[in-house]
Amino acid sequence: MSKQWPKVKLCEVLTPTARGESVDASKEYRLLGIRLDGQGPFLRETVMGTQTSATRLFRVAENDFIYSRLFACRGAFGVISKELDGCFVSSEFPAFVPVPGKIDVEYLKYWFRLPSVIATVDADCSGSTPLTRNRFKENFFLALEIPLPPLAEQRRVVARIEELAAQIHEARTLRHQAAEETEHFKSKVAADVFDAVKAEKKALGEIATKKTGAAYRADDFVESGGVPVVRLKEIQTQKPTIFLRNPDDYSNVWLEKGDIILAKTSFSTGAMCQWPGPRAVLNQNAVMLRADEGVEQRYLFEWLGQQVNRYLADHLADPNFYPYIRESELIRWQIPIPPLTEQRRIVDELDALQAEVDALKRLQAQTATELDALLPAILDRAFKGEL
């Protein structure tokens, strides 16, 4: 049942505070920032007085309510914790102390996570550049009206919100674990499938053509009008954004539809795709593989995917291992080569499994969206007195 709580202006329950200090060159200062979306203050950095351009900083204390003028419209509000007591902020971070017996700052913190409240803040902001330079002035802050039950009820509401928020966090953790297990499920099944294949094994270099991507000069890249260049990032996006103006000046690796691309080093070691087109050239740090006659390209791709996962899993346990797949090792990897009919059966089986995995991922994404919507809904009910 909804309760009609009286609305009170923040100026009636909060008192502005400004514990200003002139910066001392010999003193150390712990400086705070405030995360967006109600995530609160954090220790940004610790500097000496000589390392800041500010001539005056402001000390905050435990239980202060604080916000960022610049990013208030993006939910940069919060409470100073015990751990952050005595830290400093610039004048862009107004601070307030609660009037004793009037308001619980944790209750206020959750109120500022309501989308409707942030929309009001956004409307009250003013500045020369929308979004990035809009500042929320203290007079607007103090004029905001909050539904305010007695202090004991505020604390009960906070406790209930935190209880439900903990349950949402637990659900998110379980969903994340399930997503990770789903991500590894197909690779594990594929490994079992290929382990069960009874056929002669051949070195990868014997059954496929391998070519290494070329190193291009940056000034030969253009934003349009040339040949698409596939770099490491395009292995994942499969959408070229850089083009080569003069491909005839290089010894290129030309990619055709269906070619396998494998990142052999850098941040995306092990990333793979079958190139969907258009015809393009391959940049450095990646290799192209094209199956020879008698080997299905999709069979090679599926086998290589689980083999790369095994290789990285085996080596990443070594703290001295730098993620890198040596081509000299790659071409010696042993792949079972059954008849083409068996290769196609295996590919069909793994494709069907991938379809099930994709369906599960869609359900997990839907669950994630529903979980994200839960806390705002809980907050809305809380401040209507319905919790």
Image (cartoon, rainbow, N blue to C red):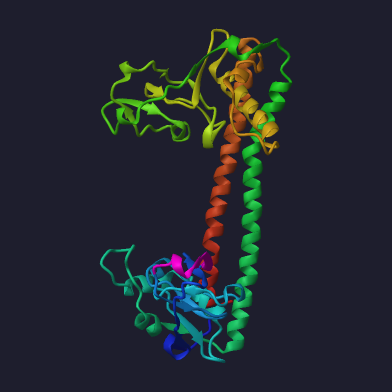
Across and down, in percent, residue 266 comes to 52, 34
Range of residues picked out in magenta: 39-53
Is-magenta flag for residue 360? no
Res. 337 visible in picture: no
Is-magenta flag for residue 48? yes
Across and down, in percent, residue 176 comes to 62, 50
Question: Quick check: 171 left or right of 291?
Answer: right
Q: Where, by quadrant of the figure, is residue 334 drawn? A: top right
Predominant SS of the magenta segment: strand
Question: Quick check: 329 left or right of 383?
Answer: right
- At horizontal 48% and vertical 67% (from top left) the residue drawn is 33
In the picture as drawn, the residue positioned furthest to the top comes out as: 293
- At horizontal 37% and vertical 32% (from top left) the residue drawn is 240
Q: Where, by quadrant of the figure, is residue 128 drawn? A: bottom left
Q: Where, by quadrant of the figure, is residue 343 drawn? A: top right
Rendered position, 314 above or below 77: above
In the picture as drawn, the residue positioned furthest to the front comes out as: 26
Res. 206 visible in picture: yes
Rendered position, 318 above or below 162: above
Q: Give the quadrant of the N terminus.
A: bottom right
Across and down, in percent, residue 3 comes to 53, 84
Q: Give the quadrant of the C terminus.
A: bottom right
Between residues 241 and 317, which one lies in front from this camera angle? 317
Between residues 143 and 3, which one lies in front from this camera angle? 143
Total of numbered circles in the picture? 0
Between residues 98 and 175, which one lies in front from this camera angle? 98
Across and down, in percent, residue 112 comes to 47, 74
